[in-house]
Image (tube, helix red, strand yellow):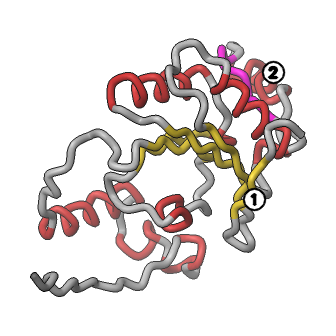
Amino acid sequence: MPLPAVTTNVVDMTTSASLPAETTPQASSGGSVTDRLVAANREYAAEFTDPGMDARPVLHVAVVACMDARLDLHKALGLELGDCHTIRNAGGVVTDDTIRSLTISQRALGTRTVILIHHTGCGLESLTEDFRHELEDEVGQRPAWAVEAFRDVDQDVRQSMQRVRTNPFLPHRDDVRGFVFDVHTGLLREIDPAS
């Protein structure tokens, strides 16, 4: 039986950073960035068709990555909607909240594989734990969380892999791999956990 033809729509996309100052989202629309995003959602919803997917990722994989806006994880990994769980935070480090999300992902939603992705030029490489003390000086209260700053991105990936592999709440700890994404080339470089 022949497969139905597939059509795709290609849309030119820009980022706010690439727009001249006079055409930034606020300047061009007269509203806030949030207003622009809500308007874009209305356009999206007008054409939206429920894909009928389950919350369980098709590929049974959870990707933990940095929140850096330069990382388009789905494109970089060849993923489609519904393929994976994506857990993002500053640095892509494995924190208690990351473990919380991974535990739910594995125990309630069937993931078995964990991929960790840090990247070159991460902002956490230029911070220290002094950031917390500066916040305390400014607001009168020190944050309960650690900055998780690092100097060596490879070593931080190794530490994150170790945190996943030794966590008792995670039943699936064997298929854990870590990578560094190069923001200039788009390539992933795998990190040997034993180095």
Query: Label 2 vs label 1: CA separation?
Result: 34 Å
- In the rendered image, the vertical position of residue 166 relative to residue 19, given as above or below: above
- In the rendered image, the vertical position of residue 53 relative to residue 26, given as above or below: above
Q: Which residue is mark 1?
A: 189
Seen at 16% across and 62% down, the residue is 45
State the extent of the magenta-drawn residues as a range.
143-149
Question: In terms of secondary structure, where does tag 1 sit?
Answer: strand
Q: What is the chief secondary structure element of the magenta stretch? A: loop
Number of other residues with Cα within 10 Å of mark 1, as a class: few under 14, some 14 to 19, many 20 or more: some
Seen at 56% across and 66% down, the residue is 76
Q: Position of residue 32 (x, y in %)?
A: 39, 58
Residue reaching furthest to the front: 1
Amino acid type for the residue under numbered disc 1: Arg
Amino acid type for the residue under numbered disc 2: His
Residue 154 is drawn in which quadrant? top right
The tag earlier along the polypeptide, 2 or 1, is 2
Q: Tell me the quarter of the image containing the N terminus.
A: bottom left
Residue 136 is drawn in which quadrant? top right
Q: Is residue 144 magenta?
A: yes
Q: Is residue 125 left or right of residue 9?
A: right
